[in-house]
Image (tube, grey):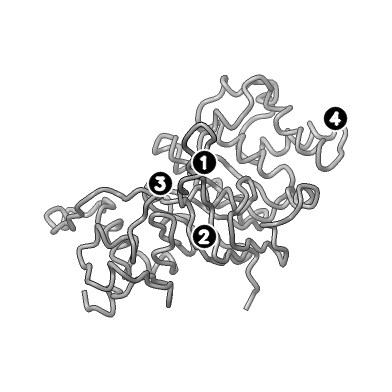
Amino acid sequence: MTDPLLQVRNLKRYYPIRKGVIARTVGHVRAVDDVSFDVYPGETLGIVGESGCGKSTTGRAVVRLEAPTAGSVVYDGTDIAGLSTAKMRRLRTELQMVFQDPYSSLNPQIRIGELLAEPLIAHKRLDRTAAHAKAAEMLETVGLPKLYLNRYPHELSGGQRQRVGIARALMLEPKLIVCDEPVSALDVSIQAQVLNLLKDLQGEFGLTYVFISHGLGAIKYISDRIVVMYLGKVMETATTAEIFAQPKHPYTEILLDAYPEPDPRLRDRQRIIVEGDVPSPANPPKGCVFHTRCPYTKDICRTESPPLADGVACHFPLEAAGR
């Protein structure tokens, strides 16, 4: 079997909570708390969950835009979690990111041609003429005409700006791209175009994706395997087909129950009612972090945190419980 391109083990990212005149640390926000998963070459791993579950922070930690508090991020045999800035710079060409907001992630004062050429000049040491020629080629690869090289980001639509963001991520010929909610800010019709573009580029360039989204439709369409996160932890991981056909974790079941299916026969189906709000990551519940909202909670769930075993972190997986 092929070795993973990316191995994340026990990843944690905590943010200190400081109070008082001397800014004393009084606690931590546990944005990512003991997350582990593998990503294999050429596949798309989807990470899904509600807003605030830690999925975007996980993605940023994978490419070292956020320094992990603990754990390891092994990319192609190298643990990048503790690499120096100089050593990490050499790996930047292989690890790229597509951001959620295609406007704020592009410098509004720089023309598109300069935005795309800049990584080649900085990392590949290409001269400006060669870098701009490469930028023109990449624009056409993502479905935009060369004349856009002289435009500013505000002169493009949201979908066009996201195509520029994708082109910028591809300029250095990376192996792994983290896509952080790349279609959530776009109209539905444009979302489909961008998703199809990502799939086409993956086949053309042999890319590996970590695709982060709260939208199950996009996750289902583009992902080979899925990691379901809640309050900084992995609840379940399995292939896309397994997740949608037979979820094992109650939280996954609830997410899928809220996913609109275009089938009139399901219009009157019984919905799962979830009570309460998502707890604060600064003060997560003891035991299973989902027990305060889980409809199947038992006493052990309130006291003991379940390990991630056989792809599910639950004391009473749905399949085993016969539900």
Mark 3 packing: few (<14 Cα in 10 Å), some, or many (20+)? some
Badge 2 amino acid: Leu
Of tags 4 and 3, which is closer to the observer? 3
Which residue position holds label 3?
52
Which residue position holds label 1?
24
Of tags 3 and 1, which is closer to the observer? 1
Residue nearest the viewer, comparing 96 with 251: 251
CA gap between label 3 and label 2 equals 19 Å
Which residue position holds label 2?
45
Which of the two labelled residues, at mark 3 and mark 1, occupies the earlier sequence position? 1
Which residue position holds label 4?
129
Badge 4 amino acid: Thr
3 and 1 marks in contact (CB < 8 Å): no
Badge 3 amino acid: Gly
Which of the two labelled residues, at mark 1 and mark 4, occupies the earlier sequence position? 1
* Furthest residue toward front: 21
| Residue 132 rendering spot, x and y as whole percentages | 78, 31
Q: Is residue 301 left or right of residue 20?
A: left
| Residue 104 rendering spot, x and y as whole percentages | 55, 29
Image quadrant where residue 122 sits: top right
Which of the two labelled residues, at mark 4 and mark 3, occupies the earlier sequence position? 3
Residue at 41% in and 60% down: 228
